[in-house]
Amino acid sequence: MQDLKGMTLQTTLMHAPRSGSVEIIEDALIAIDSDGSISSVLKPDDPAYDEAHTAAQSANTLATTAPRQYLLPGFVDLHIHAPQWPQLGKALDVPLEVWLQQHTFPLEARYADADFARQVYQELVTSLLAHGTTSAVYFATIHQPATRILADICLQQGQRGFIGKVAMDNEDQCPDFYRDANAEAALEGTRAFVDYVLSMPGNSSALVRPVITPRFIPSCSDTALAGLGALAAEYDCHIQTHCSESDWEQAYVLDRTGRTDAQALDGFGLLGRHTVLAHSNFLSDDDMDLVRSRGSGVAHCPLSNVYFSNAVFPLRRALEKSVRVGLGTDISGGPSASMFESCRHAISASRNLEEGVDPTRPGKLRGTPDSRISFREAFHLATAGGADVLDILVGRFAKGYQFDAILVDADRPAAPIAVDEAWDSQDDILQKIINGATRANITTTWVAGRPVHQQN
Ligand code: GUN
Ligand code: FE
């Protein structure tokens, strides 16, 4: 499919603008401005439809998709460790604190080599676009040149990238070979990277944005955490960190600060409207109230939680408390780059939480009632929900939103999805896509109307 800036696309669209419900429009007409934003979405019964259709046809600006192809919003992956791409799928049999020291810090230290970084980051961004991830929230490493390379690559390849130079200066928790020299270095490096992104040539639409990135409380000194909170206020930019991830992690924070992660982060000025808290499995009700009152959001990473978190995130409870939530892959804590898989794991984790997992316990005592989420809710979280956490106009097909989208083809020979249009409802078809699609089904990915991944 071609560049859709300035075009009108006639297609079957499927999106989940509100949590819990989906909207599916056959033969929708989506008009896209020259800047890649959506100027109108028309249904066939709309009075303006026929005229818009004829006008686009005669201006030669009408594009159409084939039967059994479906347009979905691009995915918003709220939590990715870019440097961990070479580790995807391995080293998952040790706890978080061992995994960090034995596997992850040694790997991340290799990004002192800019050539290595360039090679990995090119492949990562290309792969994520092929998986339909149009907005990606990245932890990079402590290194200035490598992190700038990631920003350059997102801009070149056309991915919406939210990128942070990782800050980690705590001598007790970070090895000599991979640590900011001190709090000042962590803060200076963060400021330098933020300034770099804000003045990148070709980034006037803020496709790439800087993120203040304390790795997590254990990795950072109090001085660094407070300084990063002040920087976030100064620049009014996004913040990302890990929060209440595992038994070890939350116990460490409680022991060091006397507070929960959420309380401590708030004390350092790190809980704001644009904060993304990865995991947050152990948030208490009070923590959730605090997170909601600050307008911060959670990146729920269900697959990663299986390996590192000792518990399932209480997603339903968070949603009921109006905490904003999206989904993340947590590459490489989660060994899959696919946000379709994140949806599936969010659904199955919620079902396990609801039903319980220990067959020796009586049914009534086994689980946490009313915890399940539907495929519609998972789809919402992976698209519009994530966009709302970031406060950006993507994830829905509506006037004023950016045209960030994927085209899902049910008929790829290597990956057929058994859609029966005569028998399946539209809702069934979407459910089959959420439960069954892979990157092989994504024929085109667009960001702001520009095709950024294509397979014939
Ligand atoms: N906590 C601190 N660093 C990390 C990381 O790289 N991955 C995960 N899952 N948790 C962390
Ligand atoms: Fe993580």
Image (tube, rainbow, N blue to C red):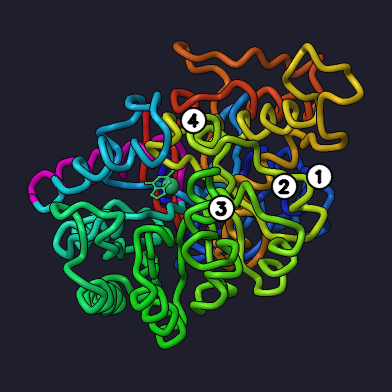
Task: Say which residue appears at 11% left-offset and 44% top-offset.
Answer: 116
Give the amino acid type for the residue marked by disc 2 in the picture.
Ala
Q: Which residue is mark 3?
A: 244
Identity of the residue furthest to the bottom in this view = 234
Would residue 48 be found to the left or right of residue 331 on screen?
Answer: right
The dominant secondary structure in magenta is helix
Q: Nearer the viewer, residue 336 or 97?
A: 97
Q: How many marks?
A: 4
Q: Which residue is mark 1?
A: 21
Asked which secondary structure carries label 4, the reply is helix
Q: Marks 1 and 2: CB-CB under 8 Å?
A: yes
Cα distance in 3D space between marks 4 and 3: 15 Å
| Position of the N terminus by quadrant | top left
Q: Is residue 287 visible?
A: yes
Which of marks 2 and 3 precedes in the sequence? 2
Q: Is residue 58 visible?
A: no
